[in-house]
Amino acid sequence: MVLPSIRHLTERQYQLFFVVQSVIARHKPQGLIRLVDRDIAEAAGALAATLETAGRGIIYEEVPQGSPARALVADISAALSQMREQGATIYDGETAIVLRAIEQGATGIKPPDGGAAAYVDLIARLLQVTTPPPSSTEPESGSSALIVP
């Protein structure tokens, strides 16, 4: 299902594709919001447009409409910046190509059940991302979170 959107990528772009996908798969939106395919497509499209515009010498940041997409753009940008700080050479043009492939994948998968998170679920399965175990700061099942004086 993902292959049509990534078959044109080079080896370096494949690597970058999976790095960005791992950021997406591990992204946790704030509150009770669940990341859906539309958010991924919007975030990837906006960041790709920003990089493509910068490649033409114009500094303009494309901002996604939805807050989950904006948060995802921030996470992807932070991951790319961190990789650059660690010495990785990441070209904006290659990143834009990868982001367009992600956008195409997120908009191109039409599940039979009509679910809004088919791409999200597929990538999580491919990357074998699982939910983290409960935090140790949560009360144990036998104790109460209520503090009585």
Image: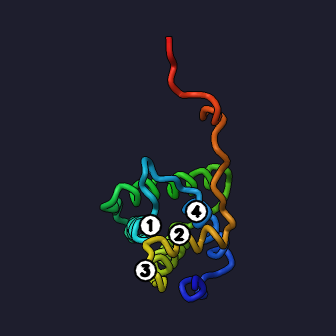
Picture residue at 59% right of the left edge, 71% below the top? 123
Identify the image quadrant of residue 42.
bottom left
Q: Is residue 13 visible?
A: yes
Asked which secondary structure carries label 2, the reply is helix
Q: Which residue is mark 2?
A: 120
Residue 60 in view, yes or no: no
Earlier in the chain: of badge 4 and badge 1, it is 4
Classed neighbour count for the residue bearing mark 4: other residues with Cα under 10 Å, few (<14), some (14–19), many (≥20): many
Q: Name the amino acid, label 1.
A: Val
Cα distance between the residues tagged 2 and 1: 6 Å
Q: Mark 4 or 2 closer to N-term? A: 4
Q: Nearer the viewer, residue 16 or 105?
A: 105
* Eye-nearest disc, 1 or 3: 3
Question: Which residue corresponds to mark 1?
Answer: 36
Q: Are marks 4 and 2 in contact (CB under 8 Å)?
A: yes
| Residue with the most extreme front position | 142
Identify whether 147 is placed above or below 45.
Answer: above
Q: Which residue is label 3 attached to?
A: 114
Report the Cα–Cα distance between label 1 and label 3.
12 Å
Up the image or down, 100 lies above or below 69; here it is: below
Q: Which residue is mark 4?
A: 25
**Mark 4 / mark 3, whichever is N-terminal:** 4
CA separation in Å, label 4 and label 3: 20 Å
How crowded pointer 2 is (Cα within 10 Å; few <14, some 14-19, many 20+) is rated as: many
